[in-house]
Amino acid sequence: SFRQGGLGPALTPARLDKPKSVYADTIRNGRSKTLMPKWGDKLSRAEIEQVLATAGAFRRILDRKVKKVPALRGKTIVNLFLEPSTRTRISFEMAAKLLSADTISFDAASSSTTKGETLRDTAQNIQALNADMIVIRHSAAGSPGYLSKLLHIPVINAGDGAHEHPTQALL
């Protein structure tokens, strides 16, 4: 469930203004924990309201003169976009940077995937290089779920096949 994934009641808008949040603790200390509900889980009304309250807190942060918070300082996020994307890729990269994470944007056209390297091999190589999280966009339905079972780092779904990604689900 959402709470078991490390974003329980302690992640409130007031907590986000503090340098160390539950969200950052999950990435920092719980490499195998998920940051969102498990594949196929549904959010309760209270959990949806918590996500919206958290978004409101970040909205207030964006209105400040200094827009960055140190929640992901020292963490590396790899944006593994294996199909074209502009808005989603930039949105994820900008969000990571505002949370003080370092980002690496994967370019499929100049990678070993053009020589036949599999998604599994690519993701395992990224994990072996000590990335802290992967954000994936892939044309195959279920690819984020597949990687989340294979890897020991968080995997965020930025779109798979014809599915909407969870970041669009509440719009």
Image (cartoon, rainbow, N blue to C red):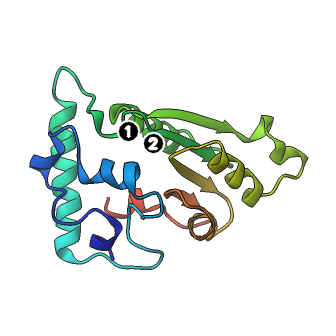
Q: Which mark is residue 11?
A: none
Q: At 24% from the left edge and 78% from the top edge, which residue is drawn?
A: 44
Q: At 90% from the left edge and 46% from the top edge, which residue is drawn?
A: 115
Instruction: Kindly check if marks 1 and 2 are in contact, taking CB atoms under 8 A apart as contact.
Output: yes
Q: Give the camera-side residue of 52 and 123.
A: 123
The mark tally for this picture is: 2
Left or right of 129 on screen, residue 39: left
Left or right of 55 on screen, residue 160: right
Q: Locate the N terminus by quadrant.
A: bottom left
Where residue 46 appears, as percent x and y from the top left, is: 16, 73
**Residue flagged by tag 2: what amino acid is it?**
Phe
Q: At 68% from the left edge and 60% from the top edge, which residue is drawn?
A: 139
Where residue 12 appears, as percent x and y from the top left, is: 14, 55
Task: Report crowding for label 2: few under 14, some 14 to 19, many 20 or more residues within 10 A (C-alpha).
Answer: some
Where residue 26 appears, as percent x and y from the top left, is: 35, 55
Task: Report crowding for label 1: few under 14, some 14 to 19, many 20 or more residues within 10 A (C-alpha).
Answer: few
Reply above or below: 40 against 66.
below
Q: Is mark 2 on a helix, strand or loop?
A: helix
Q: Is mark 1 on a helix, strand or loop?
A: helix
Q: Give the camera-side residue of 124 and 42.
A: 124
Q: Locate the C terminus by quadrant.
A: bottom left
Residue extending furthest top?
Answer: 65
The quarter holding residue 62 reads: top left
Reply above or below: 56 against 144.
above
Residue extending furthest front?
Answer: 29
**Residue flagged by tag 1: what amino acid is it?**
Ala
Q: At 71% from the left edge and 48% from the top edge, which residue is drawn?
A: 125
Q: Which mark is residue 95?
A: 1
Please give the residue where the numbered disc 2 appears in the rendered image. Answer: 92
